[in-house]
Amino acid sequence: MSDKSFSLINHKSGEQLGLETSDAVLGPSVVDITKLYSEQGVFTYDPGFGATACCSSTITYIDGEQGVLMYRGYPIEQLAEKSSYTEVCYLLMYGELPSKQELETFDQSIRNHTMLNESFLRFFNGFDHDAHPMAMVSGIVACMSAFYHDTTDIQESAHRDVFAHRIIAKIPTIAAAAYKHSLKQPFVYPQNQLGYCSNLLHMFFSVPTESYEVDPIAAEALDLLFILHADHEQNCSTSTVRLAGSSGTNPYSAISAGISALWGPAHGGANEAVINMLEEVGDPKNISKYVAKAKDREDPFRLMGFGHRVYKNHDPRATIIREMCHRVLEKLGQEKDTPLFELALELEQIALKDSYFIEKNLYPNVDFYSGIIYQALGVPKSMFTVMFAIARTVGWVAQWREMVRDPESRIGRPRQRYIGPGQRDYLPIADR
Ligand code: ACO
């Protein structure tokens, strides 16, 4: 407990209520309000949970004012430069960087779980070819809860481990199958000699009739994007996974709920929305018109890829991705032929100098630039949020594992302020 004291005064009774605070290793302390209702008969009110911590966590730390992001204490900039996505998966799940042997064993286990039960492939045929891939992926992941009855005891650490390895290994296969279904092409089976991102590119872009070489630059770019998207503490989709998982539900169902939450344009769907927006803007001469629309309170239009609930200075992931855009486009020989990137750079510059965006602390977020890289890699817009879901799966899994093992965790059950009608008597239909 912290030595900071915190008290509330009940203005009706005049009573002063001392509340305990707990310090965090980094970031703000928390005020413990768990007894507020039982002792004072009031709830706290915090729509959108802007000031509410729902758990204690050891996984990811964000300082939104300073633009800091760390996984298990390691700054994202160092992980982006020196690590790999598979190593980051291990770090997020188990808390420490792996030894060489630990990483090899983990990597091998992920490679061994990439194949899907053949029944899953038949599920895809139930979808029209124009179904959004996020709908297919969340549906198929939910279906996984109907399989694997050998590992559903979530209190068993070995069961949790197998679940974690399975979902991390199979989510690229599911995503690629959704993509192939939308193209009406045959599914491509995983090749376990390939690394995580190379395998994904192979399943996306190869066809059975031709040989296919994975472009190492594309695999490297994807690996970096996945590192940046791997976890982001208690964001909307992660909180959804924790909330669904808190009932003790099958963990595949909890992950499926997270995928559904990620889909929205205010969250992971922003990467697709950014490209739609840039295409709509079309030409640098139209930027001022769209900036004016974004500032108009009467107009629902927002600059997609701008703003963040937590980052009020800059999103460190956006800085890394902007740099990466230059490198990837240059290496792929596309830098001179990417009008959308040019447009994005110009839009960013104009918005960053505008008093509206400055006063509201609105900066480009991770998704302002990620779609441009996905596009350069040949990934279609409808698959952008699926790519995000693949990368974030490990974050959801790590957070779910932490929640299941946390002795303080209880079923998530928010309260409400009721503002509907008071009690009234039922009227028979003839009298209404
Ligand atoms: N364009 C224009 N105005 C904006 C934008 C934007 N992109 N974002 C926020 N604002 C304005 C709001 O209208 C609001 O103005 P007001 O104070 O006059 O009412 C103010 O800035 C604060 O915004 P809120 O919506 O209250 O902030 P909140 O924390 O609830 O929302 C969010 C954050 C959802 C990310 C928001 O900034 C947004 O919709 N951005 C565009 C979508 C996007 O890029 N989402 C991806 C987020 S990153 C991720 O999930 C991976």
Image: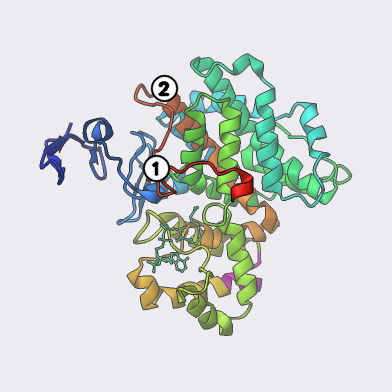
> Do the CB atoms of the residues marked 2 and 1 lie less than 8 Å apart?
no
Q: Is 168 contained in the magenta span?
A: no
Tag nearer the camera, 2 or 1: 1
Q: Position of residue 22 (x, y in %)?
A: 21, 35
| Real-space Cα separation, disc 2 to disc 1, in angstroms | 28 Å
In the rendered structure, which disc, 2 or 1, sits on the residue that comes first in sequence?
A: 2
Q: Nearer the viewer, residue 76 or 233?
A: 233
Find disc 1 in the rendering and name its residue: 416
The residue positioned farthest toward the bottom in the image shown: 285
Which of the 4 image quarters holds residue 170? top right
SS for callout 1:
loop
Residue 333 higher or lower than 228, as above or below? below
Residue 394 higher or lower than 206, as above or below? above
Asked if one can make out residue 44 in the rendered structure from this viewpoint, the answer is: yes
Q: Measuring 14% from the left and 41% from the top, which residue is drawn there?
A: 6
Q: Position of residue 409 (x, y in %)?
A: 38, 26
Task: Please count the marks in the image.
Answer: 2
The residue positioned farthest toward the right in the image shown: 209
Q: Position of residue 134 (x, y in %)?
A: 67, 47
Left or right of 338 in this view: 212? right
What segment carries the magenta color? 333-342
> Which amino acid does the dot numbered 2 rest on?
Arg
Q: Nearer the viewer, residue 432 or 364?
A: 432
SS for callout 2:
helix
Asked if one can make out residue 330 in the rendered structure from this viewpoint, the answer is: no
Disc 2 residue lies near ligand 1 with CB under 8 A = no
Which of the 4 image quarters holds residue 333? bottom right
Left or right of 295 in this view: 168? right
Residue 34 higher or lower than 6, as above or below? above
| Ligand 1 quadrant in view | bottom left
Q: Which mark is residue 405?
A: 2
> Which amino acid does the dot numbered 1 rest on?
Gln
